[in-house]
Amino acid sequence: MANTTVKLLKELNAALDLSYPQIGYSYYADVTGSGTSKPAIWTITNASGGVSRSDLNADTARKRCENIREAIRQAPRKKAINKLATDLADCATRMNNDIYGNPRYYMPAYMFPAMPDKIRARAGLQLYRGKQYGRGYVLQSYSLPHELRHVADTIVDFLETQEGYNHDNEI
């Protein structure tokens, strides 16, 4: 089963456009150097060697392979979320804190699809009412990457309910 796991992880890295060994998923027997040889799936988070135990691990090899296959099926959705979150981060502009000291970010409206107010509120976006930046949305966040991932996930969820949406389409 180890060879199957390695093959599936290569397929998952390719599906997510991850360039292992700099970043991606890998199957190691001993990453701590302690001599214990229990194989596990590890997520390589950056080229500097940041490693964390993956949530794809399971008690049995069969379940582990099922988890990887499900991740491969979800790869187009995850890529769409990552791309949207990256695009939003590129256009986010830091604003003055609100009256309670919370950091806020402005994002122009053209970065978002037409969506109902209910979806916008679920994503944590508020309408920008000032005149300095133009039409757009404000996001309150102490952790911008985390919040942008939530916004992107909410928007992709909404778009998946729309007829004719494909993850390969531009958002």
Image (cartoon, rainbow, N blue to C red):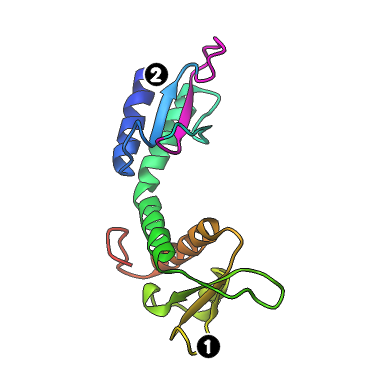
Gap between marks 2 and 1 measured at Cα: 57 Å
Sequence-first disc among 2 and 1: 2
Q: Which mark is residue 2?
A: 2
Q: Quadrant of the C terminus?
A: bottom left
Foreground tag (2 vs 1):
1
- The answer to if 79 sits in the magenta stretch is no
Q: Quadrant of residue 104?
A: bottom right
Assess disc 2: are there few (<14), some (14-19) or many (≥20) residues with their C-alpha within 10 Å of its C-alpha: few
The magenta segment: 31-47
> Disc 1 residue type?
Gly
Task: Tell me the residue at 46%/34% (across/down).
Answer: 43
In the picture, measured across the screen, residue 86 lies left or right of residue 101, that is left
Task: Tell me the residue at 41%/57% (across/down).
Answer: 81
In the picture, measured across the screen, residue 152 lies left or right of residue 72, that is right
Task: Tell me the residue at 36%/41% (across/down).
Answer: 72
In the picture, measured across the screen, residue 66 lies left or right of residue 147, that is left
Q: Quadrant of the N terminus?
A: top left
Front-lying residue, 106 or 69: 106
Estimate the x, y position of residue 118 in percent, counting from the top left: 55, 77
| Residue designated by label 1 | 130
